[in-house]
């Protein structure tokens, strides 16, 4: 059985896809893995030019070339994509169908989960509407035996003009997650190169995509129900998605060590979990001790919710190696936070920021997410956000996102009810409208102006929907010192996940990176809890 697994994404990070690809490889030896998309997911320069989040357009001849590479000799072609790549997936699925009518074509990933009605309309035989591992194993067993598979949960099937919508399976438990193979990383992988076709993924591709970093997800689930997030659909499908599930600390340690055996240059880890700090203190203590003893690499946590920021947890993870965090703030307006259904009161946000600022000597500046360009916002809402950013304890940087709508989410319904016109997620969410308010956000990242000056600057702020002057050149100019500032901060910590390409690799190879990091001040071993216990390794060591 020849199975072709295909990731459509702006790069080769593909953390979820790599998990299912490894699982399918374990089920079926003759499985090939393909990546289609732009070569670089993110970098400081792309952040400056606001190109991160753009979807690459392919010509018809390129689409034909891609489809030929995917269809050739395949019994099964399985696509995985987010909504930003939905139209590309549809175009490729139709071409694969024309080239190989005997192949079974299926589509999984986030888009078929959040918008199954759209995905099933593509030229595919099936879509996966939930977690795919156990559902795919059941499907493959029946498919190979020639048995009826149209009743398998987590799938919708098209057979003979009929559509079979099946219910959801229970979510994987933590113990079941423990049994899964480590994500596909290295080995036989192919990437599409325009004008050339599919060729093996190389070390250079990994360096261009993530620098010296390894992208990882340890825990799954999110307790929040933010209207702008696709997680709202996951929770509607199964309320248990609010609960945090994860394999053991030993498992994630083993995963990273396995990746380092493929690429010894890996020098940091990026955790993309939605709610890392929602894990209990004892769980984090076990993780911290195992990580420091077994991995000893700095790591970044991208998913932090303000209400879960506790000093003990931050101290523990900093001791383990955490040197960067990203936290969602989204707005400084109570009204807009309620609109987004985010139960994060402003005083709690400011308290979380103060806690993180205590660890500034050990961290690259924390980054806080802010959503702008919301047509629902009034002028006062915009000012409230600027006032919050003005008050925040320094140092910090901001991830500024232009509001985009994910289909089938609560936000889409809210915008329809309000009669507001907002671009969908397939439009670049980093491309900000060049308003005065957005210019000020960049200014506030660089410095806190005197109060009298800030008040004067606020006088020019307008709501998104108001007629206002465009500051296209100025918004680029204020990004230049921000870009320099960000680059220097990462260099100071020897952190090469945002500074991608071979520069970090050369420093690692020469030993300079190790020397640079040894010069950094290390935090002391923390104690926690009423007993003053210190983190120690206990329980199952997992697969590491």
Image: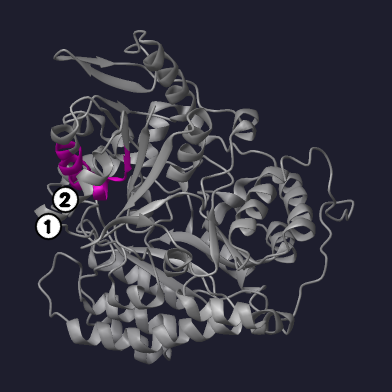
Based on the displayed image, in which of its 4 quarters is residue 154 positioned? top left
Q: Which residue is mark 1?
A: 59
Q: Is 91 one of the magenta-colored residues?
A: yes
68 with respect to 201 (left or right): left
Q: Residue at x 88, y 56 (%)?
A: 532
Is residue 372 at all visible to an observer of this figure?
yes
Percent x, y for residue 134? 49, 24
Q: Position of residue 418 (x, y in %)?
A: 16, 46
At a point 47% along the width and 45% down the height, the residue shown is: 18
Q: CA distance from mark 1 to mark 2?
A: 6 Å
Q: In the image, residue 262 lies at what x, y percent?
A: 59, 57
Q: Are marks 1 and 2 in contact (CB under 8 Å)?
A: yes
- How many residues crowd mark 1 within 10 Å: few (<14), some (14–19), many (20+)? few
Q: Quadrant of the N terminus?
A: top left
Q: Is residue 474 left or right of residue 47?
A: left
Q: Nearer the viewer, residue 70 or 410?
A: 70
The numbered disc on residue 63 is 2
Q: Residue at x 60, y 68 (%)?
A: 265
Depth order, front residue of 227/26: 26
């Amino acid at each position: 059985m020849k199975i072709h697994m295909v990731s459509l994404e702006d790069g080769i990070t593909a953390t979820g896809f790599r998990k299912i690809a490894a699982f399918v490889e374990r089920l079926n030896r003759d499985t090939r893995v393909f990546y289609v998309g732009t070569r670089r997911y993110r970098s400081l320069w792309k952040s400056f030019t606001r190109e991160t989040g753009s979807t690459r357009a392919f010509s018809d001849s390129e689409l034909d070339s891609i489809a030929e590479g995917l269809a050739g000799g395949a019994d099964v072609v399985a696509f995985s994509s987010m909504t930003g790549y939905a139209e590309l997936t549809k175009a490729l699925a139709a071409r694969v169908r024309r080239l190989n009518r005997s192949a079974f074509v299926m589509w999984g990933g986030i888009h078929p989960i959040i918008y199954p009605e759209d995905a099933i309309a593509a030229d595919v035989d099936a879509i996966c509407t939930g977690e795919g591992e156990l559902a795919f194993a059941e499907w493959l067993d029946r498919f190979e035996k020639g048995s009826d598979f149209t009743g398998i949960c987590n799938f919708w099937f098209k057979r003979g003009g009929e559509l079979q919508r099946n219910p959801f399976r229970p979510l994987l438990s933590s113990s079941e997650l423990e049994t899964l193979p480590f994500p596909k990383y290295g080995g036989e992988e192919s990437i599409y190169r325009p004008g050339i076709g599919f060729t093996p993924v190389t070390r250079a591709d990994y360096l261009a995509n993530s620098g010296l970093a390894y992208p990882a997800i340890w825990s799954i689930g999110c307790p929040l129900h933010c209207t702008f997030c696709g997680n709202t659909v996951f929770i509607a499908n199964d309320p248990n998605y609010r609960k945090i599930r994860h394999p053991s600390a030993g498992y994630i340690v083993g995963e990273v060590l396995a990746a380092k055996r493929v690429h010894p240059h890996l020098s940091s880890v990026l955790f993309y979990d939605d709610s890392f700090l929602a894990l209990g203190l004892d769980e984090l203590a076990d993780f911290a001790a195992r990580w420091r003893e077994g991995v000893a690499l700095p790591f970044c946590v991208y998913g932090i919710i303000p209400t879960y920021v506790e000093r003990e947890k931050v101290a523990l993870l900093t001791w383990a190696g955490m040197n960067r965090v990203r936290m969602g703030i989204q707005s400084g307006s109570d009204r807009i936070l309620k609109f987004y259904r985010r139960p994060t009161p402003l005083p709690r946000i400011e308290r979380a920021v103060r806690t993180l600022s205590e660890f500034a000597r050990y961290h690259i500046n924390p980054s806080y997410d802010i959503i702008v360009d919301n047509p629902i916002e009034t002028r006062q809402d915009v000012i409230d956000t600027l006032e919050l950013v003005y008050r925040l304890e320094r140092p910090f940087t901001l991830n500024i996102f232009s509001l985009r709508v994910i289909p089938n989410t609560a936000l889409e319904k809210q915008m329809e009810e309000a009669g507001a016109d907002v671009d969908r997620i397939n439009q670049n969410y980093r491309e900000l409208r060049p308003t005065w308010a957005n210019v000020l956000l960049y200014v506030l990242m660089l410095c806190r102006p005197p109060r009298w000056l800030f008040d004067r600057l606020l006088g020019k702020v307008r709501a998104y929907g108001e007629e206002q002057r465009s500051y296209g050149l100025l918004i680029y100019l204020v990004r230049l010192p921000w870009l320099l500032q960000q680059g220097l901060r990462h260099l100071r910590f020897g952190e090469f996940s945002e500074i991608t390409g071979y520069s970090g690799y050369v420093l690692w190879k020469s030993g300079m990176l190790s020397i640079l990091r040894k010069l950094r001040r290390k935090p002391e071993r923390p104690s926690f809890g009423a007993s003053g216990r210190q983190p120690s390794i206990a329980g199952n060591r997992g697969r590491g």
